[in-house]
Amino acid sequence: MSRIQETHPVQAVIEVDTRHPTGRIERDIYGHFLESAFFGNIDGGVFDEGSPHAEAGPGVRAGFRRDVLDLCRELGIPNVRWPGGNFTSPYHWEDGIGDRDARPRRLELAWGSEESNRFGTDEFLAWCADVGAEPFLVHGCRSVDDAVRWVEYTNYAGDTAYTRRRKDNGHPDPYRVRFWGIGNEPYGPWQMGYRPAAEYAAAAREHARFMRLVDPDLKLIACGSPWQQEEWTRPVLKEAGRLIDYISLHLYGAARRDGAGDDYEATVAQPLYFERQIQDYAHLVAELSAEAGLERPPALALDEWNIRHVEPAAWPEPEPGADGGTAVRELPEPAADGHQDGWRVNRYSPRTLADALFYAGVFHTLHRTAALPAPVTMANTVNLVNANGLVVARPGGAVKSASYHVWDLYQNHTGQVALPTTVEGPARSAAVRQGDNREAGGEFSTRPGVVPHLDASASQSADGRRLYVAVVNRHRDAALTARIVRDGAGGSGLPAVAQVRDLGADVADVLAANSLSEPERVAVRERGAVETPDGCYTFPAHSVTVLAYDLG
Protein backbone atom coordinates (compact mmCIF):
# COMPACT_ATOMS: atom_id res chain seq x y z
CA MET A 1 0.00 0.00 0.00
CA SER A 2 1.45 3.35 -1.01
CA ARG A 3 1.86 6.34 1.21
CA ILE A 4 1.87 9.99 0.19
CA GLN A 5 5.12 11.81 0.62
CA GLU A 6 4.88 15.11 2.44
CA THR A 7 6.37 17.63 0.06
CA HIS A 8 7.18 21.31 0.41
CA PRO A 9 7.51 24.17 -2.09
CA VAL A 10 9.69 23.06 -5.00
CA GLN A 11 13.30 24.22 -4.60
CA ALA A 12 14.92 22.28 -7.46
CA VAL A 13 14.10 20.63 -10.79
CA ILE A 14 15.69 17.36 -11.90
CA GLU A 15 15.32 16.72 -15.65
CA VAL A 16 15.79 13.21 -17.01
CA ASP A 17 16.02 12.33 -20.71
CA THR A 18 15.09 8.70 -21.37
CA ARG A 19 15.16 9.23 -25.15
CA HIS A 20 18.91 9.70 -25.53
CA PRO A 21 20.87 7.25 -23.34
CA THR A 22 24.53 8.20 -22.93
CA GLY A 23 25.94 4.69 -22.59
CA ARG A 24 26.14 1.60 -20.43
CA ILE A 25 26.94 1.62 -16.72
CA GLU A 26 29.24 -1.37 -16.40
CA ARG A 27 28.81 -3.50 -13.30
CA ASP A 28 32.60 -3.62 -12.96
CA ILE A 29 32.63 -0.04 -11.66
CA TYR A 30 31.43 -1.53 -8.35
CA GLY A 31 34.60 -3.61 -8.01
CA HIS A 32 36.94 -4.07 -5.06
CA PHE A 33 40.51 -4.57 -3.94
CA LEU A 34 42.44 -6.90 -1.65
CA GLU A 35 46.06 -6.24 -0.77
CA SER A 36 48.34 -8.63 1.06
CA ALA A 37 50.14 -7.35 4.18
CA PHE A 38 47.74 -4.40 4.41
CA PHE A 39 46.15 -3.68 7.81
CA GLY A 40 44.08 -6.82 8.19
CA ASN A 41 42.78 -6.80 4.64
CA ILE A 42 43.66 -10.46 4.07
CA ASP A 43 45.29 -11.82 7.26
CA GLY A 44 42.62 -11.24 9.89
CA GLY A 45 40.15 -10.26 7.18
CA VAL A 46 39.19 -12.69 4.40
CA PHE A 47 41.72 -15.22 5.73
CA ASP A 48 42.12 -15.94 9.44
CA GLU A 49 43.58 -19.35 10.24
CA GLY A 50 42.66 -20.46 13.73
CA SER A 51 39.63 -18.18 14.03
CA PRO A 52 36.39 -19.85 15.15
CA HIS A 53 34.79 -18.06 12.18
CA ALA A 54 37.18 -19.68 9.68
CA GLU A 55 36.96 -22.85 7.62
CA ALA A 56 38.97 -25.64 9.22
CA GLY A 57 40.60 -28.78 7.89
CA PRO A 58 42.85 -29.36 4.89
CA GLY A 59 42.40 -27.83 1.47
CA VAL A 60 42.73 -24.52 -0.26
CA ARG A 61 39.74 -23.01 1.60
CA ALA A 62 41.06 -23.66 5.08
CA GLY A 63 41.29 -20.33 6.89
CA PHE A 64 38.60 -18.51 4.86
CA ARG A 65 36.44 -16.41 7.19
CA ARG A 66 32.91 -17.71 6.66
CA ASP A 67 31.24 -14.58 8.06
CA VAL A 68 33.24 -12.30 5.76
CA LEU A 69 32.62 -14.53 2.75
CA ASP A 70 28.87 -14.61 3.43
CA LEU A 71 28.65 -10.80 3.58
CA CYS A 72 30.62 -10.46 0.34
CA ARG A 73 28.47 -13.06 -1.39
CA GLU A 74 25.32 -11.33 -0.18
CA LEU A 75 26.46 -8.04 -1.69
CA GLY A 76 27.28 -9.58 -5.05
CA ILE A 77 30.83 -8.51 -5.87
CA PRO A 78 31.64 -8.10 -9.58
CA ASN A 79 35.46 -8.24 -9.41
CA VAL A 80 38.38 -8.08 -6.98
CA ARG A 81 41.91 -6.78 -7.64
CA TRP A 82 44.84 -8.65 -5.97
CA PRO A 83 47.62 -8.87 -4.66
CA GLY A 84 47.86 -5.04 -4.58
CA GLY A 85 48.62 -2.19 -4.69
CA ASN A 86 52.12 -1.48 -3.57
CA PHE A 87 52.50 -5.12 -2.51
CA THR A 88 52.48 -6.08 -6.20
CA SER A 89 55.81 -4.61 -7.24
CA PRO A 90 58.12 -6.94 -5.20
CA TYR A 91 55.75 -9.94 -5.20
CA HIS A 92 56.82 -13.34 -6.55
CA TRP A 93 53.69 -15.31 -7.30
CA GLU A 94 55.45 -18.70 -7.09
CA ASP A 95 56.09 -18.06 -3.39
CA GLY A 96 52.33 -18.41 -2.86
CA ILE A 97 51.50 -21.77 -4.46
CA GLY A 98 51.86 -25.37 -3.30
CA ASP A 99 51.99 -26.79 0.22
CA ARG A 100 51.31 -23.88 2.60
CA ASP A 101 53.70 -25.15 5.21
CA ALA A 102 56.51 -25.29 2.64
CA ARG A 103 56.01 -21.78 1.28
CA PRO A 104 58.80 -19.28 1.99
CA ARG A 105 58.33 -16.52 4.54
CA ARG A 106 59.62 -13.27 3.01
CA LEU A 107 60.56 -9.82 4.16
CA GLU A 108 57.77 -7.77 2.58
CA LEU A 109 59.10 -4.53 1.10
CA ALA A 110 55.93 -2.56 0.38
CA TRP A 111 54.58 -2.21 3.94
CA GLY A 112 57.61 -3.32 5.96
CA SER A 113 56.19 -6.56 7.33
CA GLU A 114 56.84 -10.26 6.87
CA GLU A 115 54.74 -12.14 4.33
CA SER A 116 53.85 -15.76 5.10
CA ASN A 117 52.54 -16.43 1.56
CA ARG A 118 49.87 -18.71 3.07
CA PHE A 119 47.23 -16.87 1.04
CA GLY A 120 48.36 -17.07 -2.58
CA THR A 121 47.05 -17.47 -6.11
CA ASP A 122 44.98 -20.63 -5.59
CA GLU A 123 43.49 -19.30 -2.35
CA PHE A 124 42.55 -15.99 -3.95
CA LEU A 125 40.98 -17.63 -6.99
CA ALA A 126 39.06 -20.12 -4.83
CA TRP A 127 37.81 -17.25 -2.65
CA CYS A 128 36.63 -15.33 -5.73
CA ALA A 129 34.84 -18.43 -7.00
CA ASP A 130 33.08 -18.88 -3.64
CA VAL A 131 32.00 -15.22 -3.59
CA GLY A 132 31.02 -15.15 -7.25
CA ALA A 133 33.51 -12.39 -8.13
CA GLU A 134 35.72 -12.19 -11.19
CA PRO A 135 39.42 -12.10 -10.27
CA PHE A 136 41.72 -9.27 -11.38
CA LEU A 137 45.39 -10.21 -11.01
CA VAL A 138 48.14 -7.59 -11.07
CA HIS A 139 51.73 -8.35 -12.06
CA GLY A 140 54.67 -6.17 -11.06
CA CYS A 141 55.82 -5.66 -14.68
CA ARG A 142 59.46 -6.31 -13.80
CA SER A 143 59.91 -9.68 -15.53
CA VAL A 144 58.16 -10.73 -18.73
CA ASP A 145 58.95 -14.39 -18.13
CA ASP A 146 57.47 -14.25 -14.61
CA ALA A 147 54.26 -12.69 -15.97
CA VAL A 148 53.99 -15.22 -18.79
CA ARG A 149 54.42 -18.16 -16.43
CA TRP A 150 51.75 -16.81 -14.08
CA VAL A 151 49.29 -16.62 -17.00
CA GLU A 152 50.39 -20.10 -18.03
CA TYR A 153 49.78 -21.43 -14.51
CA THR A 154 46.29 -19.91 -14.25
CA ASN A 155 44.96 -20.02 -17.83
CA TYR A 156 46.80 -22.46 -20.10
CA ALA A 157 45.00 -25.70 -20.93
CA GLY A 158 47.98 -27.72 -22.22
CA ASP A 159 50.39 -30.11 -20.53
CA THR A 160 53.39 -28.20 -19.20
CA ALA A 161 55.39 -28.10 -16.01
CA TYR A 162 53.29 -25.16 -14.79
CA THR A 163 49.91 -26.67 -15.65
CA ARG A 164 51.00 -29.88 -13.88
CA ARG A 165 51.80 -27.81 -10.81
CA ARG A 166 48.32 -26.30 -11.00
CA LYS A 167 46.85 -29.81 -11.23
CA ASP A 168 48.97 -30.97 -8.29
CA ASN A 169 47.68 -27.95 -6.34
CA GLY A 170 44.10 -29.11 -6.81
CA HIS A 171 42.89 -27.35 -9.97
CA PRO A 172 43.36 -29.38 -13.17
CA ASP A 173 41.25 -27.05 -15.33
CA PRO A 174 42.35 -23.53 -16.30
CA TYR A 175 41.05 -20.73 -14.09
CA ARG A 176 40.57 -18.48 -17.14
CA VAL A 177 41.42 -15.24 -15.36
CA ARG A 178 40.48 -12.42 -17.75
CA PHE A 179 41.63 -9.23 -16.03
CA TRP A 180 45.38 -8.61 -15.62
CA GLY A 181 47.11 -5.45 -14.54
CA ILE A 182 50.52 -4.63 -15.96
CA GLY A 183 52.31 -3.04 -13.01
CA ASN A 184 51.21 -0.76 -10.19
CA GLU A 185 52.15 2.94 -9.98
CA PRO A 186 55.56 2.53 -11.68
CA TYR A 187 55.69 6.36 -11.85
CA GLY A 188 56.29 6.43 -8.06
CA PRO A 189 59.68 6.11 -6.32
CA TRP A 190 57.95 4.09 -3.57
CA GLN A 191 57.61 1.18 -6.03
CA MET A 192 60.16 -1.51 -6.84
CA GLY A 193 60.39 -1.08 -10.59
CA TYR A 194 60.02 2.72 -10.54
CA ARG A 195 61.01 4.01 -13.96
CA PRO A 196 60.42 6.80 -16.46
CA ALA A 197 57.45 6.72 -18.80
CA ALA A 198 59.37 5.53 -21.86
CA GLU A 199 60.80 2.55 -19.98
CA TYR A 200 57.44 1.57 -18.54
CA ALA A 201 55.80 1.91 -21.98
CA ALA A 202 58.34 -0.46 -23.54
CA ALA A 203 57.95 -2.93 -20.66
CA ALA A 204 54.15 -2.79 -20.83
CA ARG A 205 54.24 -3.47 -24.58
CA GLU A 206 56.49 -6.50 -24.16
CA HIS A 207 54.51 -7.87 -21.21
CA ALA A 208 51.22 -7.44 -23.06
CA ARG A 209 52.49 -9.06 -26.23
CA PHE A 210 53.79 -12.22 -24.59
CA MET A 211 51.00 -12.56 -22.03
CA ARG A 212 48.56 -12.49 -24.95
CA LEU A 213 50.52 -15.25 -26.69
CA VAL A 214 49.59 -17.51 -23.78
CA ASP A 215 45.96 -16.34 -23.70
CA PRO A 216 44.67 -13.98 -26.42
CA ASP A 217 41.44 -13.35 -24.49
CA LEU A 218 43.07 -11.41 -21.66
CA LYS A 219 41.77 -7.97 -20.70
CA LEU A 220 44.88 -5.92 -19.90
CA ILE A 221 45.11 -2.82 -17.73
CA ALA A 222 48.13 -0.54 -18.19
CA CYS A 223 49.16 2.11 -15.69
CA GLY A 224 48.13 5.69 -16.19
CA SER A 225 49.31 8.45 -13.88
CA PRO A 226 47.66 11.16 -11.77
CA TRP A 227 50.65 13.49 -12.37
CA GLN A 228 52.35 14.78 -15.52
CA GLN A 229 49.67 12.89 -17.34
CA GLU A 230 50.45 13.89 -20.90
CA GLU A 231 54.16 13.10 -20.55
CA TRP A 232 53.35 9.69 -19.05
CA THR A 233 50.33 8.66 -21.10
CA ARG A 234 51.59 9.58 -24.57
CA PRO A 235 54.39 6.96 -24.72
CA VAL A 236 52.24 4.31 -23.03
CA LEU A 237 49.53 4.66 -25.66
CA LYS A 238 52.02 4.97 -28.51
CA GLU A 239 53.93 1.84 -27.52
CA ALA A 240 51.27 -0.38 -25.93
CA GLY A 241 47.92 1.18 -26.87
CA ARG A 242 47.02 -1.51 -29.41
CA LEU A 243 47.62 -4.26 -26.87
CA ILE A 244 45.71 -2.94 -23.84
CA ASP A 245 42.03 -2.60 -22.98
CA TYR A 246 42.20 -0.15 -20.05
CA ILE A 247 44.46 2.52 -18.67
CA SER A 248 44.32 3.11 -14.94
CA LEU A 249 43.86 6.17 -12.74
CA HIS A 250 44.24 6.30 -8.94
CA LEU A 251 42.39 8.96 -6.93
CA TYR A 252 41.97 9.48 -3.18
CA GLY A 253 39.87 11.89 -1.19
CA ALA A 254 40.79 13.02 2.32
CA ALA A 255 38.81 13.82 5.46
CA ARG A 256 40.39 15.37 8.55
CA ARG A 257 39.94 13.57 11.84
CA ASP A 258 41.79 15.91 14.22
CA GLY A 259 39.07 16.53 16.77
CA ALA A 260 38.47 20.07 15.50
CA GLY A 261 35.25 19.29 13.59
CA ASP A 262 33.55 16.65 11.48
CA ASP A 263 34.87 17.93 8.10
CA TYR A 264 31.46 17.13 6.62
CA GLU A 265 31.30 19.84 3.94
CA ALA A 266 34.79 19.07 2.64
CA THR A 267 34.01 15.34 2.55
CA VAL A 268 30.76 15.48 0.59
CA ALA A 269 32.14 18.05 -1.92
CA GLN A 270 35.11 15.97 -3.06
CA PRO A 271 33.25 14.03 -5.78
CA LEU A 272 33.57 17.32 -7.72
CA TYR A 273 37.35 16.87 -7.58
CA PHE A 274 37.00 13.27 -8.80
CA GLU A 275 34.71 14.35 -11.63
CA ARG A 276 37.10 16.98 -12.92
CA GLN A 277 40.10 14.65 -12.74
CA ILE A 278 38.29 11.83 -14.53
CA GLN A 279 36.83 14.05 -17.23
CA ASP A 280 40.18 15.71 -17.92
CA TYR A 281 41.97 12.38 -18.14
CA ALA A 282 39.28 10.79 -20.31
CA HIS A 283 39.61 13.59 -22.87
CA LEU A 284 43.42 13.44 -22.73
CA VAL A 285 43.41 9.67 -23.28
CA ALA A 286 41.07 10.11 -26.25
CA GLU A 287 43.26 12.82 -27.80
CA LEU A 288 46.50 10.87 -27.31
CA SER A 289 44.88 7.68 -28.63
CA ALA A 290 43.95 9.48 -31.84
CA GLU A 291 47.48 10.86 -32.05
CA ALA A 292 48.83 7.30 -31.68
CA GLY A 293 46.54 6.09 -34.49
CA LEU A 294 44.40 3.85 -32.29
CA GLU A 295 40.96 2.92 -33.58
CA ARG A 296 39.47 3.72 -30.17
CA PRO A 297 40.85 4.85 -26.83
CA PRO A 298 41.19 2.33 -24.01
CA ALA A 299 38.60 2.60 -21.26
CA LEU A 300 39.57 4.03 -17.88
CA ALA A 301 40.02 1.79 -14.83
CA LEU A 302 39.76 3.70 -11.55
CA ASP A 303 41.40 0.68 -9.96
CA GLU A 304 42.36 2.44 -6.73
CA TRP A 305 40.09 4.95 -5.03
CA ASN A 306 38.70 5.80 -1.64
CA ILE A 307 38.57 8.61 0.91
CA ARG A 308 41.30 8.56 3.53
CA HIS A 309 40.75 9.61 7.12
CA VAL A 310 43.84 11.55 8.13
CA GLU A 311 44.81 12.46 11.68
CA PRO A 312 47.71 14.31 13.33
CA ALA A 313 50.92 12.31 13.00
CA ALA A 314 51.77 13.19 16.62
CA TRP A 315 48.80 11.21 17.97
CA PRO A 316 49.36 7.71 19.38
CA GLU A 317 49.35 5.04 16.68
CA PRO A 318 45.82 3.80 15.94
CA GLU A 319 44.94 0.18 16.69
CA PRO A 320 41.86 -1.82 15.65
CA GLY A 321 38.98 -1.71 18.12
CA ALA A 322 37.31 -4.95 19.17
CA ASP A 323 33.86 -3.55 18.27
CA GLY A 324 35.09 -2.15 14.94
CA GLY A 325 36.82 1.14 14.13
CA THR A 326 39.74 2.43 16.17
CA ALA A 327 40.52 1.31 19.72
CA VAL A 328 40.15 3.97 22.43
CA ARG A 329 43.34 5.97 23.05
CA GLU A 330 44.34 9.14 24.88
CA LEU A 331 44.33 12.07 22.44
CA PRO A 332 45.68 15.57 22.98
CA GLU A 333 43.47 18.62 22.54
CA PRO A 334 43.38 19.97 18.96
CA ALA A 335 45.70 22.90 18.24
CA ALA A 336 43.98 26.25 18.79
CA ASP A 337 44.97 27.48 15.30
CA GLY A 338 44.06 24.18 13.63
CA HIS A 339 47.63 23.72 12.38
CA GLN A 340 49.24 20.28 12.39
CA ASP A 341 52.88 19.40 11.88
CA GLY A 342 52.00 16.35 9.83
CA TRP A 343 49.25 13.91 8.93
CA ARG A 344 48.93 10.16 8.64
CA VAL A 345 46.17 7.89 7.40
CA ASN A 346 44.20 6.02 10.07
CA ARG A 347 43.47 2.66 8.41
CA TYR A 348 41.09 1.65 11.22
CA SER A 349 38.89 4.76 11.17
CA PRO A 350 35.30 3.61 10.47
CA ARG A 351 33.31 4.56 7.41
CA THR A 352 30.72 7.20 8.29
CA LEU A 353 27.47 8.59 6.92
CA ALA A 354 29.49 11.51 5.50
CA ASP A 355 31.69 9.00 3.68
CA ALA A 356 28.55 7.28 2.36
CA LEU A 357 27.47 10.53 0.68
CA PHE A 358 30.95 10.89 -0.79
CA TYR A 359 30.79 7.38 -2.27
CA ALA A 360 27.35 8.04 -3.73
CA GLY A 361 28.65 11.22 -5.34
CA VAL A 362 31.56 9.33 -6.91
CA PHE A 363 29.15 6.73 -8.31
CA HIS A 364 27.18 9.55 -9.93
CA THR A 365 30.44 10.73 -11.47
CA LEU A 366 31.20 7.24 -12.77
CA HIS A 367 27.70 6.96 -14.24
CA ARG A 368 28.22 10.22 -16.09
CA THR A 369 31.48 8.99 -17.62
CA ALA A 370 29.37 6.76 -19.88
CA ALA A 371 29.11 9.84 -22.13
CA LEU A 372 32.88 10.41 -22.26
CA PRO A 373 35.16 9.28 -25.12
CA ALA A 374 37.09 7.10 -22.63
CA PRO A 375 34.52 6.05 -20.01
CA VAL A 376 35.30 4.47 -16.66
CA THR A 377 34.21 0.86 -17.07
CA MET A 378 36.07 -0.61 -14.08
CA ALA A 379 36.72 0.74 -10.59
CA ASN A 380 38.13 -0.86 -7.44
CA THR A 381 37.82 0.72 -4.04
CA VAL A 382 40.63 0.29 -1.50
CA ASN A 383 39.80 -1.93 0.40
CA LEU A 384 37.12 -4.60 0.56
CA VAL A 385 37.74 -5.85 4.11
CA ASN A 386 39.17 -3.85 7.03
CA ALA A 387 41.60 -1.03 6.17
CA ASN A 388 38.68 1.40 5.64
CA GLY A 389 36.76 -1.30 3.81
CA LEU A 390 33.16 -2.30 3.17
CA VAL A 391 33.33 -5.18 5.62
CA VAL A 392 34.89 -4.87 9.08
CA ALA A 393 36.21 -8.13 10.56
CA ARG A 394 37.28 -8.49 14.16
CA PRO A 395 37.92 -11.60 16.28
CA GLY A 396 34.33 -11.34 17.56
CA GLY A 397 32.66 -11.23 14.14
CA ALA A 398 32.12 -9.19 10.99
CA VAL A 399 29.86 -6.24 10.19
CA LYS A 400 28.75 -4.26 7.14
CA SER A 401 30.22 -0.75 7.22
CA ALA A 402 28.26 2.29 6.03
CA SER A 403 30.01 2.02 2.64
CA TYR A 404 28.74 -1.55 2.15
CA HIS A 405 25.20 -0.18 2.04
CA VAL A 406 26.10 2.42 -0.61
CA TRP A 407 27.42 -0.33 -2.89
CA ASP A 408 24.28 -2.37 -2.26
CA LEU A 409 22.06 0.60 -3.08
CA TYR A 410 23.78 1.44 -6.37
CA GLN A 411 24.85 -1.90 -7.81
CA ASN A 412 21.65 -3.72 -6.86
CA HIS A 413 18.99 -0.99 -7.07
CA THR A 414 19.89 1.23 -10.04
CA GLY A 415 19.93 0.58 -13.80
CA GLN A 416 22.49 -0.38 -16.43
CA VAL A 417 21.74 2.40 -18.92
CA ALA A 418 22.95 5.94 -18.11
CA LEU A 419 20.59 8.80 -18.91
CA PRO A 420 21.26 12.54 -19.33
CA THR A 421 20.32 14.20 -16.04
CA THR A 422 20.42 17.86 -15.05
CA VAL A 423 19.70 19.58 -11.74
CA GLU A 424 18.65 23.20 -11.28
CA GLY A 425 18.64 24.09 -7.63
CA PRO A 426 20.45 25.68 -4.70
CA ALA A 427 24.20 25.45 -4.29
CA ARG A 428 27.03 26.91 -2.24
CA SER A 429 30.38 28.38 -3.19
CA ALA A 430 33.28 26.59 -1.55
CA ALA A 431 36.99 25.91 -1.59
CA VAL A 432 36.77 22.31 -2.84
CA ARG A 433 39.45 20.06 -1.41
CA GLN A 434 41.53 18.41 -4.12
CA GLY A 435 41.58 15.00 -2.56
CA ASP A 436 44.67 14.05 -0.57
CA ASN A 437 46.93 16.49 -2.42
CA ARG A 438 48.94 18.86 -0.22
CA GLU A 439 50.51 22.28 -0.58
CA ALA A 440 54.18 22.90 0.28
CA GLY A 441 53.26 23.73 3.89
CA GLY A 442 51.33 20.47 4.32
CA GLU A 443 47.80 21.89 4.08
CA PHE A 444 45.28 20.36 1.70
CA SER A 445 45.05 21.83 -1.79
CA THR A 446 41.73 23.47 -2.68
CA ARG A 447 40.14 25.10 -5.71
CA PRO A 448 37.16 27.47 -5.78
CA GLY A 449 33.99 25.71 -6.88
CA VAL A 450 30.21 25.64 -6.76
CA VAL A 451 28.83 22.65 -4.86
CA PRO A 452 25.18 21.82 -5.68
CA HIS A 453 23.20 20.69 -2.67
CA LEU A 454 21.43 18.08 -4.82
CA ASP A 455 23.30 15.74 -7.15
CA ALA A 456 21.32 13.30 -9.29
CA SER A 457 22.02 10.35 -11.55
CA ALA A 458 19.26 8.69 -13.56
CA SER A 459 19.46 5.27 -15.15
CA GLN A 460 17.20 2.71 -16.82
CA SER A 461 16.96 -1.04 -16.81
CA ALA A 462 18.29 -2.70 -19.96
CA ASP A 463 14.73 -3.30 -21.23
CA GLY A 464 13.70 0.32 -20.58
CA ARG A 465 10.82 -0.70 -18.33
CA ARG A 466 12.20 0.74 -15.09
CA LEU A 467 13.59 4.20 -14.36
CA TYR A 468 15.86 4.89 -11.38
CA VAL A 469 16.61 8.37 -10.05
CA ALA A 470 19.38 8.47 -7.45
CA VAL A 471 19.72 11.73 -5.51
CA VAL A 472 22.27 12.87 -2.95
CA ASN A 473 21.21 15.73 -0.69
CA ARG A 474 24.52 17.13 0.56
CA HIS A 475 22.92 19.80 2.71
CA ARG A 476 23.79 19.12 6.32
CA ASP A 477 20.51 20.38 7.83
CA ALA A 478 17.84 21.11 5.21
CA ALA A 479 15.47 18.75 3.44
CA LEU A 480 15.08 19.86 -0.18
CA THR A 481 12.08 19.32 -2.45
CA ALA A 482 12.65 18.67 -6.14
CA ARG A 483 10.33 18.04 -9.07
CA ILE A 484 11.53 15.24 -11.34
CA VAL A 485 10.61 15.83 -14.99
CA ARG A 486 10.90 13.12 -17.62
CA ASP A 487 11.60 13.97 -21.26
CA GLY A 488 10.57 17.61 -20.94
CA ALA A 489 6.95 16.71 -20.31
CA GLY A 490 4.40 19.39 -19.45
CA GLY A 491 3.85 17.62 -16.14
CA SER A 492 6.35 15.26 -14.60
CA GLY A 493 5.85 12.55 -17.23
CA LEU A 494 6.23 9.99 -14.45
CA PRO A 495 3.99 7.43 -12.78
CA ALA A 496 2.39 8.67 -9.57
CA VAL A 497 4.16 6.11 -7.37
CA ALA A 498 7.84 5.27 -6.85
CA GLN A 499 9.53 2.53 -4.88
CA VAL A 500 11.84 4.35 -2.47
CA ARG A 501 15.03 3.37 -0.70
CA ASP A 502 17.22 5.77 1.24
CA LEU A 503 20.29 5.92 3.44
CA GLY A 504 20.96 8.49 6.14
CA ALA A 505 17.45 9.93 6.34
CA ASP A 506 16.97 8.60 9.86
CA VAL A 507 20.51 9.33 11.13
CA ALA A 508 21.24 12.63 12.88
CA ASP A 509 25.03 12.33 13.31
CA VAL A 510 26.92 12.76 10.02
CA LEU A 511 29.84 10.81 11.54
CA ALA A 512 27.63 7.88 12.55
CA ALA A 513 29.23 4.51 11.79
CA ASN A 514 28.36 0.85 12.16
CA SER A 515 29.95 -1.52 14.67
CA LEU A 516 29.51 -5.08 15.85
CA SER A 517 27.25 -3.80 18.65
CA GLU A 518 25.32 -1.40 16.35
CA PRO A 519 25.45 -3.13 12.96
CA GLU A 520 22.55 -1.27 11.29
CA ARG A 521 23.07 2.28 12.50
CA VAL A 522 23.76 3.45 8.92
CA ALA A 523 21.93 1.26 6.42
CA VAL A 524 19.53 1.33 3.48
CA ARG A 525 15.89 1.69 4.56
CA GLU A 526 13.14 0.43 2.26
CA ARG A 527 10.22 2.89 2.30
CA GLY A 528 8.04 0.87 -0.07
CA ALA A 529 5.67 2.44 -2.59
CA VAL A 530 5.43 6.21 -2.13
CA GLU A 531 3.17 8.63 -4.01
CA THR A 532 5.18 11.45 -5.60
CA PRO A 533 2.60 14.05 -6.68
CA ASP A 534 3.58 15.77 -9.94
CA GLY A 535 7.01 14.13 -9.67
CA CYS A 536 7.82 15.93 -6.42
CA TYR A 537 9.85 14.41 -3.62
CA THR A 538 11.42 15.91 -0.51
CA PHE A 539 14.93 14.58 -0.03
CA PRO A 540 16.00 14.48 3.63
CA ALA A 541 19.12 16.31 4.78
CA HIS A 542 22.47 14.44 4.49
CA SER A 543 20.93 11.49 2.69
CA VAL A 544 21.05 9.32 -0.42
CA THR A 545 17.72 8.31 -2.02
CA VAL A 546 16.86 6.07 -4.97
CA LEU A 547 13.38 6.33 -6.50
CA ALA A 548 12.40 3.51 -8.86
CA TYR A 549 9.54 4.08 -11.33
CA ASP A 550 7.80 1.33 -13.27
CA LEU A 551 7.48 2.52 -16.88
CA GLY A 552 6.23 -0.80 -18.21
Image (cartoon, grey):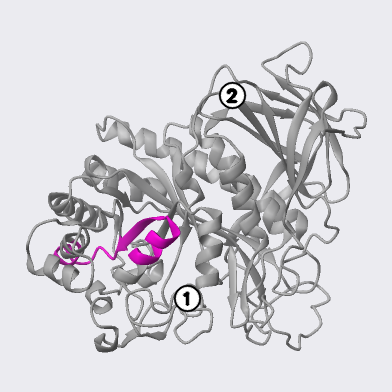
Q: Are marks 2 and 1 in contact (CB under 8 Å)?
A: no
Across and down, in percent, residue 392 comes to 60, 71
- At x 63%, y 81%, the residue is 396
Which residue lies at the image location 66% right of the left edge and 78% below the top edge? Answer: 341
> Any mark on residue 163, and which?
none
Q: Is residue 170 magenta?
A: no
**Residue ranking furthest to the top:** 490
**Callout 1 amino acid:** Phe
For the point 43% across and 31% down, which residue is it? 373
**Span colored in magenta:** 125-147
Residue 432 in view: no
Tell me which label, 2 or 1, sits earlier in the chain: 1
State whether residue 295 is above or below residue 156: above
Q: Which residue in the structure is indicated by mark 1?
A: 38
Relative to 367, does residue 65 appear above or below in the rendering? below
Q: Position of residue 55 (x, y in %)?
A: 44, 77
| Helix, strand or loop status at disc 1 | loop
Badge 2 marks a residue whose secondary structure is loop
- Dot 2 crowding, Cα within 10 Å, few <14, some 14–19, many 20+: few
- Read off the residue under disc 2: 465
Q: Between 347 and 256, which is closer to the camera in this rendering? A: 347
**Total numbered badges shown on the rendered structure:** 2
Q: Quadrant of residue 108?
A: bottom left
| Residue at position x 78%, y 85% in the image | 332
Question: Where residue 476 appears, x then y in whole percent?
Answer: 83, 51
Q: Is residue 429 visible?
A: yes
User: Left or right of 537: which side holds 250?
Assistant: left
Q: Is residue 226 above or below residue 411?
A: below
